[in-house]
Amino acid sequence: MKFFVDTADIDAIRELNDLGMVDGVTTNPSIIAKSGRDILEVTKEICDLVSGPVSAEVVALDAEGMIAEGRKLAKIADNIAVKVPLTWAGLNACNVLTNEGNMVNVTLCFSANQALLAAKAGATFISPFIGRLDDINLDGLELISDIRDIYDNYGYETQILAASIRSANHMSDCAKIGADVATAPPAVIKKMADHVLTDKGLAAFVEDAKKANITIL
Ligand code: G3P
């Protein structure tokens, strides 16, 4: 499973990228607003840092506006994936931008039917939001699984990009289901390394090494 990092925080992206943990980056208007930076500038900086796809989201609501914004975003770098919302206008924009040779990420997906439409529109990525479904007592992981089945049934090449990931468990659950990509905040990716038994075991090893005076360098 590919790891995308869901942030516009350059330092956080750099830290994970240097460790080989970053296959791409996703942003959205809320993330850009949080960065306090100009969308074109910060997106360019991310694209210079990361070689994989960098999702940059349109803000227009009509297809024509999304297409114009998407074309401008796509000019930032070769690795831009234009992100459009899963509305009828967004699907229309997806179709046009895909046919022009751009990567397109269709976001705000909350149902299998929406994911089916995105695949028909030629999306490179579909972004189902797990956490926001869980927030309203629906099952985000079940949606990932349903989309996996549907795409596999027909050989759709649209990649499932699990989004709105809130916990380390979401990451392994998505990997078990077979999501192609999971995008998560840097803190969630780092949290995947934690285990109480690792901490406990390491404390015992440190203690024993001290007692036995073990030195290596
Ligand atoms: O990738 C989408 C993500 O940014 C949304 O996450 O936690 O706001 O639902 P969240």
Image: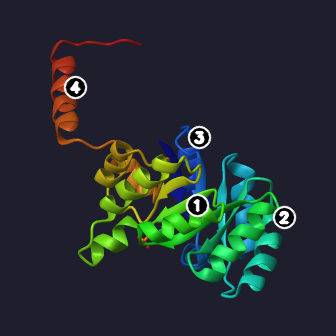
Instruction: Identify the residue at image location x=72%, y=76%.
Output: 38
- The residue beneath circle 2 is 75
Label at residue 189: none
- The residue beneath circle 3 is 18
Which amino acid is tagged 4? Answer: Val
Query: How far apart are labels 2 and 1 at the CA level?
Result: 24 Å
Which amino acid is tagged 3? Answer: Asp
Residue 211: image x %, image y %? 15, 17
- The residue beneath circle 1 is 119
Work out which quarter of the rendered image holds the C terminus and state it: top left
4 and 7: which is toward the camera: 4
Q: Nearer the viewer, mark 1 or mark 4?
A: 1
Q: Secondary structure at mark 3?
A: helix
Q: Nearer the viewer, mark 3 or mark 2?
A: 2
Q: Secondary structure at mark 1?
A: helix
Instruction: Identify the residue at image location x=56%, y=46%.
Output: 22
Identify the mark nearer the N-term, 3 or 2.
3
Query: How far apart are labels 3 and 2 at the CA level?
Result: 26 Å
Residue 120: image x %, image y %? 61, 63
Residue 128: image x %, image y %? 45, 65
Identify the mark nearer the N-term, 2 or 1.
2
Is label 3 in contact with label 2 (beta carbons under 8 Å)?
no
Residue 70: image x %, image y %? 76, 72
Label at residue 206: 4
